[in-house]
Image (cartoon, grey):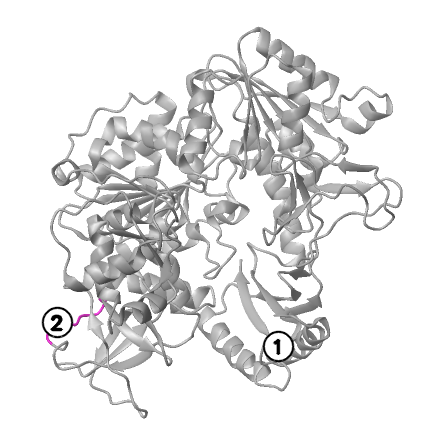
Amino acid sequence: MPKYADVIVPLPLQEAFTYAVPPECQPKIQVGQRVIVPFGIRKFYTAIVLRLHDDTPPYPTKPISEVLDTEPIVLQKQLQLWKWVSDYYLCSMGDVFKAALPSGLKLESESTILPNQDWQADAPLKPSEEKVWQALQPKTKRSKATGQTLANLQKATGLKNILPIVKGLLEKGAVQMKEELRRTHKPKATAQADEQSPLKAAEVLTEAQQEAMDSITEQWQEKDVCLLHGVTSSGKTEIYIHLMQQALAEGKQVLFMLPEIVLTAQLTERLRRVFGTRLGVYHSRYPDKARVELYQKMLSEKPYDIVVGVRSSLFLPFHRLGLIIIDEEHETSFKQQEPAPRYHARNAALVLARQSGAKALLGSATPSLESYHNALSGKYGLVTLKTRYAGLSLPDIEVVDVGEMQRKKLMSGIFSPQLLAHIRKALEQHQQVILFQNRRGYAPVLECKACGWTPRCQKCDVSLTVHRGYRQMVCHYCGTAYDIPSACPNCEGRDLSSRGYGTERIEEQLQALLPKARIARMDLDTTRSRQNYEQILHDFEEGRTDILIGTQMVTKGLDFDRVSLVGILSADSMLAQPDFRSYERAFQLMEQVAGRAGRKGSAGHVVLQTRDAGNGIVGMVVRHDYEGMYAEQTEERELFRYPPFCRVIFIYLKHRDEKVVESLSTDFASLLRQVFGERVLGPDTPPVSRVQMMHIRKLILKMELSAPMSAVRERLNTLQEQILNMPGYRSAQIYYDID
């Protein structure tokens, strides 16, 4: 019987923690189970058992409070993936734990619990459960329950071990976590969820699609990963469906990964027609209770055969995973930015496929340079599909020089006369229009015309974006909102004007120009909930909307029959980003949004507005020349040593005192150069150098692809510990962003 357990707690701490296993827990404890552990003086957490052993540690150990599960909820294969993510992306296993499990499976003392007032009991509650239920009720009938943390709830009830009690109430639906979205979730009846729907026949593949599918299957004989480079509207999804049917016929499970929640609504409907109840959907816009149910179903004897999901779906438990499809594999949304783990879901999914003995398919009309490079060098298989479905041509792209139009005073706000003419023509012919502007809000800047003052966030080093709908100015970095001033606080002038265009302002101006047009906007502000974005897409699909204005959400693989025109309102903002990937991403965004035009019946037309009409990337978009863009960008990347020819590690240093972070970055750079030499660049001040009151500096470490990340991690951890133990630096933060 094991006497000790090494456990992972959901905290950004590098090592696992050892606890004593009480005699009553020894017969039932297993690796991968959840246990309750005390941590510090008054806190407790749900932890995951990583290792069981009899090695007595050289320090006193606290006992595990309770084992929560009868069977492991994290499989051995999942723990292997957690370990790889932790090692490669230079973060802790606790960071991965927090990202990998739904909130309802990782209660902690800081979790806030609310009573579910719609809940009706099927049977009397236990005395301890009743005590918790009553403690959560509002003090008066007219007031609303605000919720309590588990730590406060334990204090209020006097119950010593409250976590398993709350776990039981969560499972009954009597309480809910505050993290849940306010959406009524009705779990499917067990019989309905467990029955295996018969597979329905998919459409017959065209000759080009069949050739592509046969080629993919052939490539998989020698390579585990294949890249499908298929132009927009070439019918990649139909190939995916046939490959999924093939995997299911072999008794295997499929993970279908998408970069954006907004894509799941349209695609899921299409997949359900073929796969029925054998399909599960997993993403963050679903209530936590629904995600917990899906997670538990995947552990059951009758799991979903296919899961459609975004980044976090790769952390689900799969017993017989045989195929991973990663659609729109080039998308930046696959990269987690904040908080840690800052992993790339595409790359982690390929590791999951390798660990599971599964095949992987990457699909895109504009592959990432890294994936295309791996395919051309023979690391991946490569299949191309260069014809659009039903023989349609790629859309014509008309470039409009906005600078020239403004000099001639022909612009109507942000709209060129060419674009407006095409919009009117499309509406007359009962066609639909998509307008793309990669900036939400009303205007990026408010400016005093008298003195030039612009409002900036008090916590971050950025200007505030005006949101007319909220009647506020909002910081897009920390989320802080400010009232719009009636007068300039600098000179007291009252001539304050909005500068620049966000999607909200474009919608307002277009409605004034075309009062009869039915216009909708699709950005982060209008798609806060799952119902919002589903309704916007449904209305557009059903023809109840004429013009859809959106941010990069509208570029991602959406398929509409009646879209004949796409307008790219400002290509320059994409081309001017201070990032070595900016030209690649600008090409991908413009080519992808252009591909929304003319998907059924006609080729479609695109109007691309820019002040830099002579830019080479603009010409490549017009010619749909992906290979030309790849050749130019890889030549430049190889010259200056950027991916795919090396591994880039961004090192961020943060502190509340700017002088401290300046000194820290210089000292840490010096330490790093003693180990890594000329591979270290910086320190540098990033374009946004203060976020949420923390000043930021940045270092870059360029490592050879052959360098083992485990050795790099070990050296970085040693140097980080060394620098943070120096006087004055103990409260600083250092973290890493890989690739």
Residue 638 position, x and y percent, is 63, 54
Judge from the rendering whether residue 199 lies leftward or rightward of residue 157; answer left or right. left
Whole-number angstrom distance, CA of label 2 to CA of label 1: 47 Å
Q: Which mark is residue 672?
A: 1
Residues packed near mark 2 inside 10 Å, few (<14), some (14 to 19) or many (20 plus): few
Q: Quadrant of residue 240?
A: top left
Q: Which mark is residue 28?
A: 2
Judge from the rendering whether residue 345 lies leftward or rightward of residue 6; answer left or right. right
Which residue is at the front of the view, 379 or 155? 155
Judge from the rendering whether residue 629 lies leftward or rightward of residue 322; answer left or right. right
Say whether marks 2 and 1 touch (CB < 8 Å). Answer: no
Which residue is at the front of the view, 183 or 34? 183
Q: Residue at image x 81%, y 19%?
A: 410
Chain part drawn in magenta: 27-33
Residue 109 position, x and y percent, is 35, 68
- Is 656 in the magenta? no
Residue 263 position, x and y percent, is 42, 35
Q: Is residue 375 above or below residue 431?
A: below
